[in-house]
Image (spheres, rainbow, N blue to C red):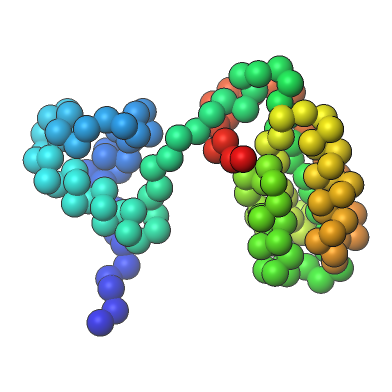
Amino acid sequence: MKSKPLVLDDTDKAIISELEKNGRESYKNIAKRLGVSDGTVRLRTERMVKSGYLRISASVNPLYFGDSLLALVGINLANPANKEIMRRIGDLQGVQSVVNVSGRFDLMVEVFVASRDDLRRFLIDDLSEVGGITSTESFVLLDGVGKWVEQKS
C-alpha cells in the first residue's frame, strides 16, 4: 500500500517552530503552548520524521571558536549532476552538505573543519581522490548570523 504524501498544516508548522527553538523541549510543553494534546505533538512529529521531512539534531555555531573554518566550495565536474561524485564528496570528513546548483558551478559543498590545515587537506588531498572534478573555488566564511552546522568527527 502506497503512503499518502506529507501535507503540512498550521499545527505541523507550529510544532516545527517550537522544535527549532529547542529540539529537546518535551511534547507536553509544546502541546500546552499550542493548545493541543501531547499525543498530537508526538504523532505529528513522528510522522514528519518517518516521512523524511523532519530531523531533530544537535547543531553547533561554526564561528564560535576562532580556529575552526566554515567554507563553501564551488566545484565544476567533467560530467555535471553526477550523483556518485556527490555521494563520494558527501562522505569526506568535514562535509556538511553537497548540492547541485545552477550558475557557474555544478556543485556547492559546505565544509566545516577545525583548522586551515584541515581545509588544505580537504581541498588538495581529499577532493583530488574523488576524481571527475575539473575546478574548484573556495569561499571562507568570515562571520555570520544564524548559521549552525552538525559537529561531525
Residue 88 appears at what percent x and percent y?
Answer: 71, 61
Which quarter of the rendering shows the N terminus? bottom left
Residue 148 appears at what percent x and percent y?
Answer: 55, 31
Q: Give the side of residue 75 with respect to residue 10, left or right.
A: right
Residue at left offset 19%, top offset 51%: 43
Which quarter of the rendering shows the C terminus? top right
Residue 74 appears at what percent x and percent y?
Answer: 79, 48
Q: Let me know if residue 36 appears in the view.
A: yes
Label tally: 0
Q: In the displayed orientation, state which residue is furthest to the bottom.
A: 1
Q: In the picture shown, does residue 141 fall above or below 138? A: above
Q: Image quadrant of residue 47?
A: bottom left
Q: Let me know if residue 34 appears in the view.
A: no
Residue in the foreground of this view, choosing between 5 and 130: 130
Residue at left offset 19%, top offset 43%: 41
Q: Give the side of residue 21 with respect to residue 4, left or right.
A: right
Residue at left offset 12%, top offset 30%: 32
Q: In the picture shown, does residue 113 fall above or below 130? A: above
Residue in the foreground of this view, choosing between 71 and 88: 88
Residue at left offset 78%, top offset 68%: 80
Residue in the foreground of this view, choosing between 116 and 51: 116
Q: Image quadrant of residue 135?
A: bottom right
Residue 54 appears at what percent x and percent y?
Answer: 38, 50
